Image (cartoon, helix red, strand yellow):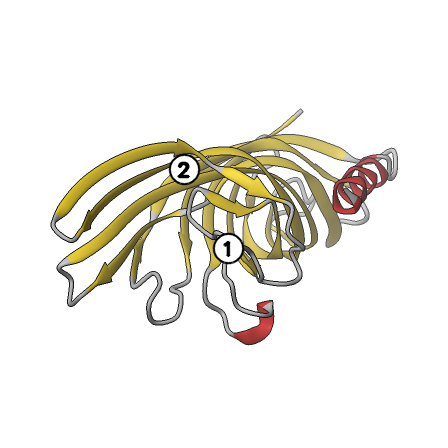
Amino acid sequence: MNMKKTTVMLMVTLMAMGAKAQFYAQGGLNLANITNTNSGHTEKNHLLPTFNVGLMSRFGISSSFDLESGILFTGKGSKAETYFDNGENYVKTKFNPLYLEVPLNAVVKIPLNAKAKSNIFFHAGPYIAVGVGGKSTSDSRIIGLESSSSSTIKFSNDNPFTSQQDDAAYNKLKRFDFGANFGGGIDFGKVMLKANYGFGLAKINSTQSDNGANDKNKFRTLSISLGIPL
């Protein structure tokens, strides 16, 4: 509950900053994945194509530096494969959780012309996200019996700063995620091309004791997006 309130307050505060704020609609492709877990859990994982869409804002601080925030409806997840008994048994899962994400980026701009109407930019900063939906499908073979299933992803309210969760599965994830973004792009004035890499810092459903134990079982999301000023 506290993180929800923090997200809303941060969003309202940042959107209210300055009369020079420039809003733009953003949408694009996500190539989502997770880091491999320790032995006995996910052994292979592959990119999952999904999407991002939302409203972003820059606050017009200067021609060379700015702050950027907004709210994105964004997909994460992976195509994960787990094998047992030398590969004779397996669980293959495609899970696509959907989040509302609030980033806060520092933006450095390099003007491409004297009037600074177009520029190359680089950005970096933290994000927080809350899970709101998604689907998970699974194909398995256990002791020679094959099965398939599909389910709606359920989110728990476990503390995102720890990694303890009972009954962890790819259709039961932690509701809250946090991490860091970095990337860049080209702003042509009337349209913006943007690449971003989301580096998750919270374990999504691990039963390990803390997030800092290693970099396993965390979201990694490459986004390629188009921005159109409003």
Q: Furthest-top residue in view?
A: 230
Name the residue tied to disc 2.
Answer: 50
Q: Residues within 10 Å of mark 1 (few under 14, many from 20)?
A: many
Instruction: Describe residue 19's horizontal placement relative to residue 129 as left or right.
Output: right
Number of numbered tags placed on the structure image? 2
Amino acid type of the residue that numbered disc 1 sits on in the rendered structure: Asn
* Element type at mark 1: loop
Residue 194: percent from left, percent from top: 52, 44
Residue 170: percent from left, percent from top: 42, 47
Instruction: Describe residue 106's horizontal placement relative to residue 75 as left or right.
Output: right
Judging depth in this view, the residue of 119 and 4 nearest the camera is: 4
Residue 58: percent from left, percent from top: 73, 41
- Kindly report the distance in space between the C-alpha atoms of the residues bearing marks 2 and 1: 20 Å
Residue at image location 71% in from the left, 43% down from the top: 69
**Is there a contact, CB below 8 Å, between mark 2 and mark 1?**
no
Name the residue tied to disc 1.
Answer: 205
Residue at image location 40% in from the left, 52% down from the top: 33
Residue at image location 48% in from the left, 39% down from the top: 97
Q: Residues within 10 Å of mark 2 (few under 14, many from 20)?
A: many
Residue 102 lies in what quarter of the image?
A: top right
